[in-house]
Image: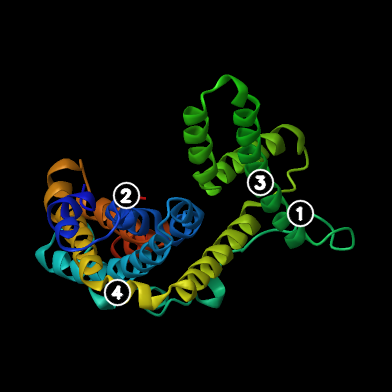
Amino acid sequence: MVGLGPFILIISKLWDIPAMFGAVIEVGFEGGHGTASGLAPTFEMMKWPEGKDFALASATVGIISAVLCGIVLINWTNQKGYTQRSLQIENIPEDETIGIIPVDRRPVAGYLSIHTDSLDAMSYHVAIVGIAVGVGYLLKEGLVTIICFFQAVLSPATYTSIITIVNSFPLFPLCVIGGLIVQLFAQRFDKHETIDIGLVRRIQNMALDILIVSAVAMIQVVIVVQGIVPFTMMVIGGILWNIFCLLVLAKRLLPDSWFERAIAEMGQSMGVTATGLMLLRIVDPDYKTNAL
């Protein structure tokens, strides 16, 4: 709504930009760099490869805006007394302000489930993630094969339409299904519980960091600059909508701890889940509310 509204009412009348531009804010803010990167082949198949650059730029602006707007809103609402916990600087542990966990309170990152002389545990878990991705790839290829099998009974126009949709469908949602299949298989047959959630999370976080850095480096700034005015209008609309949801809708709709719940949602809706959790930790470091 926020993306398509300004596009229909203003942008489409002033600039010659494809209608898919209206989806940039949704892909970048709510989806993030992962969705923007994953949809790159789709933008290319839809004859608008520049959409990838606008989506990645939107995701980048979204994360930065989430942190900056989130900190400002946290300080303002704390002064108004809307937070469940008073955020006096002297009451905040040092590790919360400098981002470093004290030596005596550092949690375990993960457990080695396999003897190193047999197989490195990290390599094993990377392979598990790779299998999940592989299953997702096979699912997509299977869909294409099924559509091709029914080509003889479909009209040329219907076949072309369906095969275009299937080919343009991004791979990563199918990889999510692949991960679910691997998890169900492990729960059924991995009696020794060799998959450690801590190591999987380390791989997840590292992959996300690499993804964001690589995605930002891939942005063709020249393309974004050419459409900087409509892009800025779109981004401002997304930021204002999120702030409106937090300050107006959340206060009236959420049952309790409305600000803690809403600041986490705002961080996630403008960046990634980790951004929302970071903002939540500032206002609710011990997770005493139901927000988490």
Viewer-side label of 3, 4: 4
Viewer-side label of 4, 2: 4
Q: Which mark is residue 291?
A: 2
In this rendering, would 40 be left or right of 257? right
Residue 19 point in image, percent of width and height: 28, 51
Query: Disc 4 on helix, strand or loop?
Result: helix
Q: Which residue is mark 4?
A: 226
Distance, label 1 to label 4, CA atoms, is 52 Å
Are the residues at dot 1 and dot 4 in contact (C-beta closer than 8 Å)?
no
Q: Which mark is residue 113?
A: 1
In this rendering, would 265 be left or right of 273? left
Q: Nearer the viewer, residue 36 or 204?
A: 36
Mark positioned earlier in the residue sequence (4 or 2)? 4
Q: Nearer the viewer, residue 190 or 1?
A: 1
Distance, label 2 to label 3, CA atoms, is 30 Å
Q: Nearer the viewer, residue 187 or 5?
A: 5
Q: Which residue is mark 3?
A: 132
Query: Disc 2 on helix, strand or loop?
Result: loop
Mark 3, other Cα within 10 Å: few <14 / some 14–19 / many ≥20: many
